[in-house]
C-alpha cells in the first residue's frame, strides 16, 4: 500500500532511504535544514569498505585511550567542559569492547556494507564518482599489525580478500610510502568516492527527477496522538505524513527523545584537511591504523580526515584538530606540501557499539529510525535505505536486521 512518507535528513542515509521508498511506489518528501549532502556526508573520508569495517571499541584501542587524551596531536579529544556529559557514552563504549560483542558487531557491519557498490549503482550513475581500486591500511608497528591479522580470519571466512604485505610490497602499490611504514593490509575490493557531496547530490537529483520533493526547513517538534506521529512541525509549516523516517544523523536523538526513546547517540566531531596541491597523490585510499586517520585522493585534492572530538553539537570548531593531520600525513608520505588547503568539521553520529540504529521506534507505530552510522556512513547508507524500505513494505529484510534494532539497548 502506498504511503505518504516524510524522511527527516538529506544526507547519504536519508537520500538512499528516500530513493528505495520511492521505488516502492510511496510518495516521499525529504526534509532537512540544509541542502542534500551538506552535513556529515560532505566532509567524510569517502571510504567504501565492504570488507574492512569493524567496531571501534577494540581492546587494543581502549588500552591507548588514556595516552591519547593527554596528547595534543592524538586522535581523541574530550573537551573539559563536556567530559561529564560524554562520560556515560564513553562507559558504554568501553563495555562494547568485549570480544563477543566485537565479533557480533563485525559480522553485522560486513553484512550492512558488503553490497555497497552494487546498491549505489542501482540508485544512481556512479561511474564518475566511485573508484573501486582497492584500499590500504598501513602500519608503523609490528604489534598493531599482529593484532589486525586476527580480524583477517573472520574476513576470509566470509570470502573477503585481504593481502598481508611487507613494507616493500606495500610500496609497489603506493611508491610514496615513507620509511615509517613496516606492514600493510591491502583490500582489493574496497574503494573510495572522489566527492561524497556530489554523490549525495546525484542521489538527490535522481530522487527529484522521479517526482520526490526536497524541502529546506528545520524540524522543531513532533506531535504524537494515539500511538502515532500525527504531525511534524517545522519552522515554517506542519506536515502530516502517514509514516516518518528519522535519518537526521547526530541530531536524531533529540527527535527520538520526543517519542519516548532514549538512544546513546553522541557526536564524534570529525575534521578534515583537504590539500589542493599536496605534491603527492596516491591513487587509492590509505588508513593509518596507529594514527587513526585516512588519506583519500579526491577531485578537489588530497583529503586527510579523522580524529574524534567530544564537545557536543554547539561548540565552535577547533581547527588545530585538522592542522595536526598534515603532520601525521607527512610522516607517512614524506615530502607533502600545503597550499590553499581547506579545513572542515562535521558531526559523526556515533553509537557505543559502532552499529547504527535501523528499525522501528519503540512507542509509536509509524516511525522508523535510520541513524548512528558513525565512521562508516557512506558504506552503510545504501543497505540501510533498502532495509527501511523492506520493513515498511512488510518484506523479509535483505539481511539480518536484528543487530541494528533499538531494542538492543
Image (cartoon, rainbow, N blue to C red):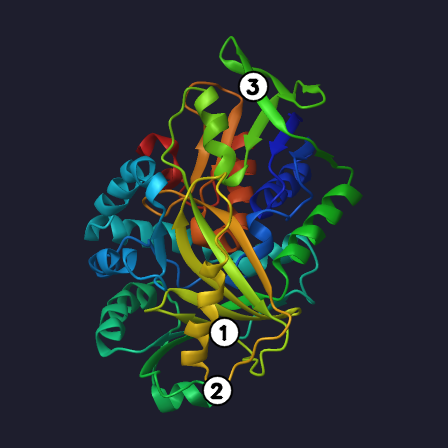
x and y, in percent, of residue 109 in the image: 39, 52
Residue 16 found in image quarter:
top right
Inspect this view and state whether residue 92 appears: yes
Kindly identify which residue carries mark 1. 134
Residue at the spot x=47%, y=28% of the render?
254
Mark 2–mark 1 Cα distance, whole angstroms, equals 16 Å
Helix, strand, or loop for circle 3?
strand
| Camera-side mark, 2 or 1 | 2
In the picture, the quarter occupied by the N terminus is top right
Residue at the spot x=32%, y=50% of the render?
105
Are discs 2 and 1 less than 8 Å apart at CB? Answer: no
Kindly identify which residue carries mark 2. 176
Task: Using the image, determine if residue 280 lies above or below residue 103.
Answer: below
Kindly identify which residue carries mark 3. 222
| Camera-side mark, 1 or 3 | 3
Helix, strand, or loop for circle 2?
loop
Left or right: 32 in relation to 360:
right
Amino acid at each position: 500500500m502506498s504511503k505518504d512518507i516524510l524522511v527527516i535528513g538529506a544526507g547519504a542515509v536519508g537520500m538512499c532511504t528516500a530513493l528505495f521508498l520511492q521505488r516502492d511506489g510511496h510518495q516521499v518528501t525529504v526534509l532537512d535544514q540544509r541542502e542534500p549532502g551538506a552535513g556529515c556526508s560532505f566532509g567524510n573520508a569517502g571510504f567504501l569498505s565492504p570488507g574492512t569495517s569493524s567496531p571501534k571499541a577494540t581492546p587494543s584501542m581502549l588500552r591507548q585511550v588514556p595516552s591519547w587524551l593527554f596528547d595534543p596531536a592524538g586522535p581523541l579529544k574530550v573537551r573539559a567542559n563536556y567530559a561529564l556529559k560524554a562520560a556515560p557514552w564513553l562507559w558504554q563504549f568501553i563495555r562494547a569492547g568485549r570480544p563477543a560483542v566485537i565479533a557480533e558487531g563485525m559480522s553485522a557491519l560486513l553484512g550492512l556494507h558488503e553490497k555497497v557498490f552494487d546498491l549505489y549503482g542501482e540508485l544512481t550513475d556512479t561511474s564518475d564518482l566511485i573508484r573501486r581500486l582497492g584500499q590500504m591500511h598501513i602500519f608503523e608497528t609490528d604489534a598493531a599489525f599482529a593484532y589486525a591479522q586476527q580480524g583477517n580470519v573472520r574476513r576470509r571466512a566470509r570470502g573477503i580478500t585481504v593481502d598481508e604485505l611487507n613494507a616493500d610490497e606495500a610500496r609497489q602499490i603506493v611508491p610514496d610510502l615513507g620509511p615509517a611504514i613496516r606492514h600493510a593490509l591491502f583490500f582489493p575490493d574496497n574503494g573510495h568516492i572522489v566527492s561524497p557531496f556530489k554523490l549525495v547530490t546525484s542521489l538527490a537529483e535522481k530522487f527529484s527527477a522521479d517526482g520526490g520533493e526536497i524541502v529546506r526547513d528545520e524540524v522543531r517538534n513532533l506531535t504524537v496522538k494515539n500511538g502515532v506521529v500525527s504531525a511534524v512541525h517545522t519552522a515554517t509549516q506542519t506536515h502530516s505524513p502517514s509514516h516518518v523516517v528519522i535519518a537526521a544523523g547526530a541530531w536524531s536523538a533529540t527527535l527520538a527523545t520526543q517519542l519516548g526513546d532514549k538512544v546513546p547517540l553522541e557526536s564524534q566531531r570529525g575534521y578534515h584537511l583537504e590539500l589542493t596541491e599536496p605534491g603527492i597523490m596516491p591513487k587509492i585510499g590509505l588508513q593509518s591504523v596507529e594514527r587513526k586517520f585516512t588519506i583519500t585522493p579526491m577531485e578537489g585534492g588530497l583529503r586527510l580526515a579523522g580524529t574524534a572530538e567530544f564537545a557536543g553539537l554547539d561548540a565552535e570548531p577547533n581547527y588545530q584538530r585538522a592542522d595536526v593531520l598534515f603532520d601525521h600525513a607527512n610522516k607517512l608520505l614524506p615530502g607533502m606540501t600545503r597550499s590553499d588547503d581547506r579545513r572542515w568539521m562535521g558531526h559523526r553520529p556515533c553509537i557505543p557499539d559502532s552499529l547504527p540504529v535501523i528499525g522501528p521506534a519503540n512507542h509509536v507505530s509509524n516511525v522508523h529510525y535510520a541513524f548512528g552510522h558513525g565512521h562508516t556512513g557512506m558504506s552503510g547508507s545504501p543497505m540501510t535505505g533498502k532495509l527501511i524500505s523492506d520493513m515498511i513494505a512488510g518484506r523479509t529484510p535483505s539481511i539480518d536486521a536484528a543487530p541494528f534494532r533499538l531494542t538492543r539497548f
